[in-house]
Image: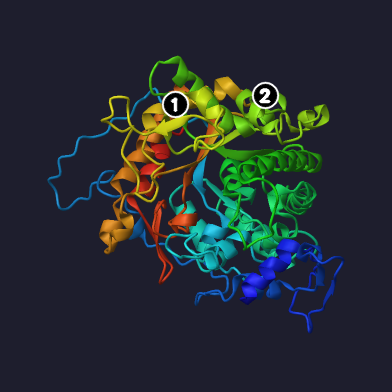
Amino acid sequence: MSLSILFALLFAVSPVVVSQHASVPSSTVASTSQTSSGASSFTTSVELSVEDLWDLYVGPVSTFSINTTVEPTPIPSSSLVPPPALYYPPFPKGQQVPLQPKNESWKFPKGFWYGVAGAAYQIEGAVKAEGRGPSIWDVLTHRVVNYVSTNDTGDIADNNYYQYKEDIARIAALGLKTYSFSLSWSRILPFGSGSINEQALLHYDDVIDTCLQYGIIPQVTLFHWDLPLFLQNTYNGWLSDKIISDFTDYARIVFNRWHSKVHYWFTVNEPIVFCGFYPLPANYFKNTTIPPKQQPYVCGHNVLLSHASAYHLAKSINSSLSVSFKTNGGFKIPRTDSQADAEAVQRAWDFNEGWFANPTFINGDYPTHLKDYVSGFLPAFTDKQKAQINGTCDIFAHDAYTSDFIMAPDAGIDACIANTTNPLYPGCYNTTKVYANGYWTIGAAGDPGTPWLNQATDWVPSFLHYMQDTWKPRGGIAITEFGISEPYEELRTNLASILIDPIRSNYYKSYLEAILIAIGEGVNVVGTLAWSIYDNLEWSQGYSVKFGIQYVNLTTQERYFKASAFEYANMFNVYLEK
């Protein structure tokens, strides 16, 4: 039996007590007591340091040559010249490109914030530096075979942990005004709770101060999927209500530290997605008896209670803060005008955005179709819990990349609901990117590594109207992630071809035009964040899929603006109300 499997089993069957040392202890003390002949009855107490967690569960990690914080180097003026579609150099002459006239009826209102987003595990690197504890993603990328299709890790990523000053300077050089980033929970609390890593707090102090120095609005997400490994191995992470108090304690640390400098906060990023990670791969984390299909909804239940707890805590510290979570999804379009497809669309809303938006924006409880399913195994929210959850998002923060046609399952919705083995159960709706004629797709496709993503910007105004009409957010709507993976960008080998990204450039232009249409029709959209600040670790696709408006040479860590960066920034140069 390998050492990794041995210790995985140790956590899987036994409660573990950990002494939260900052360095490797001189000795590791273990004691066991047998209470019956069954293996599951053995209990173990073990002292482990942060270094032990790395050694036992992750193994060696890679590092980069730049391993101290560096000051930004001057940005060459040549790198700030937009591509020909926006700028026509004096020589050579002769291009004949039709001008894009400004629509004088469109405008982004004063106070509209616009910028870029990134996430800790995807960009920071320096995974073991200065006391950071491992997260579940360190295990998933290092130990679980083929969990990441390219076998990439976040060990180095974009080296943002040391090059953040340059990154923020580059955001400012583009004329963007907002930088949204996430904190690494296991960097601040290496075990997820208990001892605080002051070095991590000092690091994020400077990230925030650097934003303010450059006139950039910092927006902070507490959790973007990188759950501290120790919490998963101790009590199954988001599958246990124990996480509510640990998340609240973590939130207390960061809200107290930065409430006077950071106005916009997001508690969790895309719970629809990270709850869908459950069940985690077997034999790498603590086992659970919760049935696999129920696990995402158990996770979601605890996320809602954790978010609500953190929200009220934030308001008690500083009532002026804007606090929300970021949900995700796309517009749901009935593929035909049949009643069955209309019902399928409603089920799609209930099992996606409505899962988290209805409790927080409408009534503190789940939407009808979802509630019908989860009531069989989740405890109903009490009246007190409903009151605690309802109203706990100040804006509707939505990561909205694309849209889908929705249709009923071939055998019908009722047949699907009655058959728990149906792959579409429990949602019991189907999706496609192809119009009902079976010929045209909804829009240009992204990279094959993102089969869920097509450009569907024609539907953005309708989507924004739906958000406003359905959930009526008091602080307006923000598109907190949007972007597209340029097809086959990974295969480009020379810099000039990499930096021209026509599908992504068109995506941002047409998407922002769609937002302008919706604003003109009365939808209160308050901000946008492009995903992403630069190419990064795209989770299970590694570095093979590119979403960045900047290219990063991962060998040298040099950064370069792509054409889409200028297209995105130019829309605000043209349409932001002065």
Report the residue at 64% width, 55% height from top.
183
SS type, badge 2? helix
Q: Nearer the viewer, residue 436 or 254?
A: 436
Residue 476: x and y in percent read 59, 28
Instruction: Name the residue nearer the viewer: 322 or 276.
Output: 276
Quick one: 290 or 211, which is closer to the camera? 290
Q: Residues within 10 Å of mark 1 (few under 14, many from 20)?
A: few
Instruction: Using residue 388 as the reference point, say whether residue 139 is left or right of it.
Output: left
Q: Alpha-carbon distance for marks 2 and 1? A: 33 Å
- Within-10-Å neighbours for mark 2: few <14, some 14–19, many 20+: some
When asked about the image quadrant of residue 267, the answer is: top right
Q: Three-letter amino acid code at disc 1?
A: Ala
Q: Which residue does the image show at 52% across and 60% down from the upper left?
A: 123
Q: Amino acid at mark 2?
A: Ile
| Residue 171 image position (x, y, % from top left) | 48, 53
Q: Is residue 315 left or right of residue 151?
A: right
Residue 465 seen by the camera = no
Q: Position of residue 105 (x, y in %)?
A: 39, 22
Name the secondary structure under disc 1. Answer: loop
Residue beneath label 1, please? 411
Is label 2 or label 1 in front? 1
Please name the residue that numbered disc 2 is placed on: 362
